Amino acid sequence: MNEEFKGQFEALLSKYTELMTGTNGEELEEKVRYWVLYTYIAKTMPALAKHWNALYPKGKEQMMEIISEIKVLNENHRNKRD
């Protein structure tokens, strides 16, 4: 991958994070990146996600915290727009 593509993709992630949560920043963008990847894996290969959850229970716990945080931020952002 070239640097131009990386920059363009980071801009996409930044905008997605902003539209989802009403804000952005490096730490939040990283959490959204993990959330997107985990959600995609869980939907397309649920057995893999289940295996990972069993293998790394602390990782699963942290992932659930990230998911909850993003969900709350998204709900708060949607409520502000209404």
Image: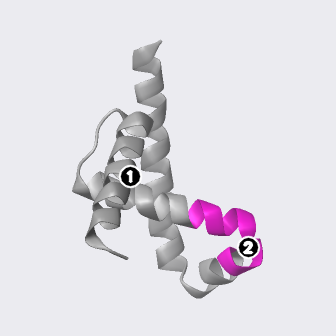
Residue at 44% across / 46% down in the picture? 70
Q: Secondary structure at mark 2?
A: loop
Q: Residues within 10 Å of mark 1 (few under 14, many from 20)?
A: some
Q: Nearer the viewer, residue 61 or 38?
A: 38
Q: Provide the residue span drawn in magenta.
A: 38-49
The answer to whether one can see residue 79 in this image is yes
Judged left or right of residue 26, residue 37 is right
Horizontal side of 18 relative to 44 (left or right) equals left
Left or right: 27 as drawn, with respect to 76: left
The residue at which mark 1 appears reads as 13
Q: Quadrant of residue 66?
A: bottom left
Amino acid marked by disc 2:
Met
Q: Is residue 61 left or right of residue 53?
A: left
Q: Taken as a whole, is the magenta stretch helix, strand or loop?
A: helix
Residue located 42% across and 48% down the image: 69
Mark 1 and mark 2 residues within 8 Å of each other at the beta carbon = no
Residue 44 colored magenta?
yes
In the depicted structure, whether residue 10 falls above or below residue 37: above
Number of other residues with Cα within 10 Å of mark 2, as a class: few under 14, some 14 to 19, many 20 or more: few
* First in residue order: circle 1 vs circle 2: 1
Give the vertical position of 27 relative to 61 (above or below): above
Q: Is residue 10 magenta?
A: no
In the picture as drawn, the residue positioned furthest to the top comes out as: 82
The residue at the point 53 percent across, 65 percent down is 37
Instruction: Give the numbered dot on residue 45.
Output: 2
